[in-house]
Image (cartoon, grey):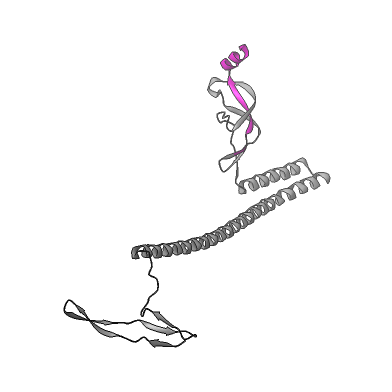
Amino acid sequence: MAERNATQEAREQDTGGEHVRVVDRRRVRTDETGAGVTVQEGAAEAPSLKPKYVEELEARTRAAEQKALDVQARFEQVRAQLQRETDETRQRLNRAADERAARAKAEFVSSLLPVLDNLQRAVASAEQGGTLEALLDGLHGTISGFEQALNNAGAEPINSVGAQFDPELHEAVDTIEVAPERDHTVTAEYSRGYKMGGQLLRPARVQVGRARSNVQAHSEE
């Protein structure tokens, strides 16, 4: 489609004695049929109806939303990484704890093997007609080895005989009449008590002395 300039007419009009020059700047576009179509020269696109500050606010909002999405994505990435590291650390600690428990169990069992050896030797000696003294020596050695194994494992015996009765450590099996100054004193031990790391494994089963006055008062009740 060819375009041609419309004839520019310059004319002078008399407006109150003054001459005004009018220039027609319209352009004529010829279509396929040859008809001329007049168009306005320099026509621009439709202007935006939004004020400039609104457009700036919208641009800032879009930028802020994109930044928030980027921050959220980074946060999810860091959280996933921390979760993996936490799981790995927990598994590593669990494995280390299991290994320590297994080593402690193996060490305790190993410490009991000499005790078993002493018992077997004592039985063999008795079966071969050994003396009572030899048998007792074997049993004493077995007891000593067993106590040493308990001590190595962290178990501590509770010293009871001669100590004041303590219901936290002792279990009174029976009583015996004693002098007033020995009232509530442990006079005998039937089975030894043990504790480990401040925790009571079992109380000692003991006999407790009671003064005569207390015994009478108890019998009268």
Magenta stretch: includes residue 191: no
Along the line of sight, the residue nearer the viewer: 183 or 99: 99
Q: Residue at horizontal 45%, vertical 84%? A: 35
- Seen from the viewer's position, the closer of residues 134 and 88 is 88
The image shows residue 57 at horizontal and vertical percentages of 37, 62
Quarter of the image where one finds residue 66: bottom left
Which residue is at the far top? 220
- Seen at 63% across and 22% down, the residue is 176
Q: Which residues are magenta?
A: 200-221
Residue 63 lies left or right of residue 151; in this view the side is left
Vertical order, 49 against 203 (above or below): below
Q: Residue at 61% x, 57% y: name it.
A: 91
Magenta stretch holds residue 217: yes
Q: How many marks?
A: 0
Q: Position of residue 107 (x, y in %)?
A: 66, 53
User: Percent x, y for residue 140?
Assistant: 69, 43
Q: Is residue 47 left or right of residue 148?
A: left
Q: Residue 150 occupies which quadrant of the picture?
A: top right
- Residue 181: image x %, image y %? 53, 22
Instruction: Give the residue at x 20% y 79%.
Output: 14
Q: Is residue 179 left or right of residue 145?
A: left
Seen in the picture, residue 213 relative to 156 is either above or below; the reply is above
The C terminus sits in image quarter: top right
**Residue 38's image quarter?**
bottom left
Which residue occupies the extreme right position in the image?
128
Give 42 or 162, whichever is nearer the viewer. 42
Left or right: residue 45 compared with residue 10: right
